[in-house]
Image (spheres, grey):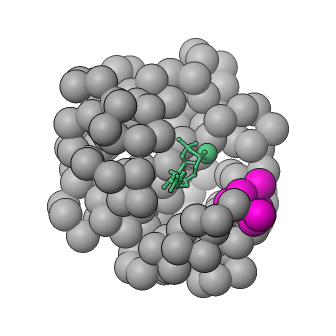
Amino acid sequence: MERTFVMVKPDGVRRGLVGPILTRFEQKGFKLQDLKLMMIDRELAEQHYGEHRERPFFGELVSFLTSGKVCAMVWEGPNAIAGARLLIGQTNPANAAPGTIRGDFALEVSENIIHGSDSAESAGREIALFFGDAEEPDIPRFNIDEID
Ligand code: RTP
Ligand code: MG
């Protein structure tokens, strides 16, 4: 069993695509482990996309990511990291196959709707970055892992 971090970017939230995206992941069979709608500050956006710091589009990417609410999620299932990337499709929506999220809902690389972790190392890092230590929730709640 594997966990991955997925995030609907501000363009996806603005366009009302959270529902259709949740549906695709649920229909595939992945299990939703955590979810929150949130604003990202500049520091979190820069940390999240730290590997692209030297790329020419980095400033634009960070501005875009902080331009509105995102929907951060953790999904679980066999091969969840690669499986989520298959549902998401190629980085540039112009090359993304129909049937994938980017292939069906987006036109341009700068507004490509959704993020998915690209490796086990990224997934662990990104889940910690966005959801912190699951053992210490900031709001008292039932332990969701004990509910089927
Ligand atoms: P993501 O991290 O958002 O899931 O996307 P990805 O793995 O498919 O692609 P990555 O190489 O990690 O790029 C991160 C985001 O940067 C923007 N980008 N712009 N203008 C460009 O050539 C360009 N290349 C990448 C995209 O928004 C991409 O999602
Ligand atoms: Mg990436």
**Residue that appears at 50% across and 48% down:** 115
Q: Above or below — where is 85 with respect to 147? A: above
What residue sits 22% from the left and 54% below the top? 17
Please determine whether, in this image, residue 32 is positioned above or below residue 64: above
Whether 131 is among the magenta residues is: no
In magenta stretch: residue 51: yes
Q: Nearer the viewer, residue 46 or 6?
A: 46
Outermost residue toward the top in this view: 78
The answer, for residue 59, to whether it is visible in the render is yes
- Ligand 2 is in which quadrant of the figure? top right
Left or right placement of residue 113 versus residue 44 in this view:
left
Q: Is residue 146 visible?
A: no
Region rendered in magenta: 49-54
Residue at the location (34% across, 41% down)? 93
Residue occupying image coordinates x 30% and y 59%: 12
Seen from the viewer's position, the closer of residues 56 and 15 is: 56
The image shows residue 117 at horizontal and vertical percentages of 62, 41
Name the one closer to the observer, 39 or 97.
Answer: 97
Compared with 53, 124 (above or below) is above
Q: Could you say which is closer to the camera, residue 62 or residue 23?
A: 62
Quadrant of the rendered image containing residue 44: bottom right
Left-right relation of 72 to 133:
left
Check the picture and name the quadrant holding the N terminus: top right
Q: Quadrant of residue 50?
A: bottom right
